[in-house]
Image: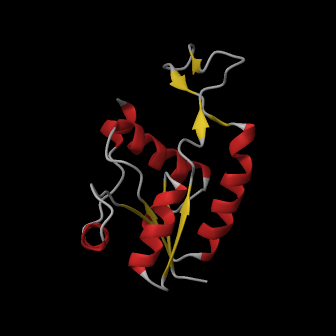
Amino acid sequence: MAKNLVIVESPAKAKTIERFLGKDYVVSSSYGHIADLPSKELGVDVDGEFTPKYIVSNDKKKVVSELRALAGKAEKVWLASDEDREGEAIAWHLAEELNLDKSQVKRIVFHEITKYAIQQAIETPRQIDYNFVNA
């Protein structure tokens, strides 16, 4: 198993990026959001500082299970969702739902899918931006 797992939003991106990174990397997709507010109940705790309650939808449980298994075998997990509030939320949900150790997680972003852009992103990782997540 590769030492590094890169999780992107799109399966089409995953195949291209994996070719750029080589044998030490496995690239997989979250297929977009993996968690959302519940549809059949109020999604915030009105008695507890309005804390949101997120759940993994039934159609994403298999994806989450597969990603959790891959992450368990990797030394580092690179969260490579888009660089916007939605992408940051996806990265945060992945970190939470996969039970990732913060020391194991790297957040990367890129604006084009080229070998150079991907390598630059790997060389300049950052942490999840909780200001974006909370926005």
Work out which quarter of the rendered image holds the C terminus and state it.
top left
Q: Is residue 85 left or right of residue 53?
A: left
Find residue 126 and report its horizontal and vertical position in percent: 29, 60
Instruction: Name the residue at 54% across, 20% down.
Output: 48
Work out which quarter of the rendered image holds the N terminus and state it.
bottom right
90 lies above or below 95:
above
Q: Quadrant of residue 124?
A: bottom left
Instruction: Name the residue at 49% across, 51% down.
Output: 9
Find residue 115 and report its horizontal and vertical position in percent: 30, 73
60 lies above or below 98:
above
Find residue 45 and report its horizontal and vertical position in percent: 58, 19
Find residue 8 and report its horizontal and vertical position in percent: 47, 57
Q: Quadrant of residue 16?
A: bottom left
Instruction: Name the residue at 48% across, 44% down.
Output: 90
Residue in the foreground of this view, choosing between 128 and 28:
28
100 lies above or below 2:
above
